[in-house]
Amino acid sequence: MLRNPAYKGTACFGKTQVAPRQKVTKPFRLSGRASFSENTSQHERPREEWIEVPVPAIVTEETFALAAERLTDNKRFAPRRTIEPSIVQGLVSCRKCGYALSRTSTRTSARKIHYYRCLGADSWRHLGGSVCDSRPIRQDLLDEVVWREVMRLIEDPR
């Protein structure tokens, strides 16, 4: 509802087109349709190709723009159910397969070690076994690298 431009007074037609599927997403796989025979999906067309039809507005343009901004911020910064948040939580993905990295932990006799693991490497998540062979990344090492880079950018914004 908050993404539909008809609420601000502009109904649009021709917003999407059928195109080859970029990648097989989790919801698509879980629906049981993840075969290569159905290799299409809906993709948004460029804004200039939409056919706009004026309709009575329900909300003002300003309210619609504010809602769009909030949706974007919420998607990016929404808090997760995390007791101990980390610097890059929710922002990193696997370079090999594109799946998100989730944070998990293991316990040694001396301490608890947190690390990021590719969701594609979990064989129990995928019907044919794991789709990625990337190794877990220790959280403390990745956070240190990211923090050093953030500090470098703050000190020299160029």
Image (tube, rainbow, N blue to C red):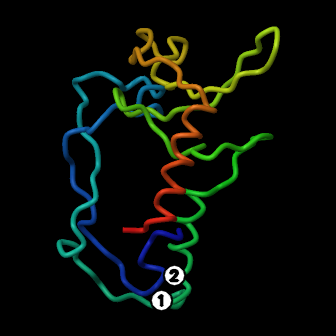
Answer with left or right where residue 20 lies relative to residue 158.
left
Foreground: 132 or 86? 86
> Looking at the rendering, which quadrant does residue 116 occupy?
top right
Foreground: 98 or 154? 154
At 77% from the left edge and 14% from the top edge, which residue is drawn? 107
Residue 64 is labelled as: 2
Find residue 144 and report its horizontal and vertical position in percent.
58, 40
At 41% from the left edge and 9% from the top edge, which residue is drawn? 128
- Identify residue type, mark 1: Glu
Answer with left or right where residue 55 lies relative to residue 20.
right
At 61% from the left edge and 31% from the top edge, which residue is drawn? 139
Residue 41 is labelled as: none
Q: Which residue is mark 1?
A: 61
Foreground: 99 or 37? 99
Q: Are marks 1 and 2 in contact (CB under 8 Å)?
A: yes
Secondary structure found at label 1: helix
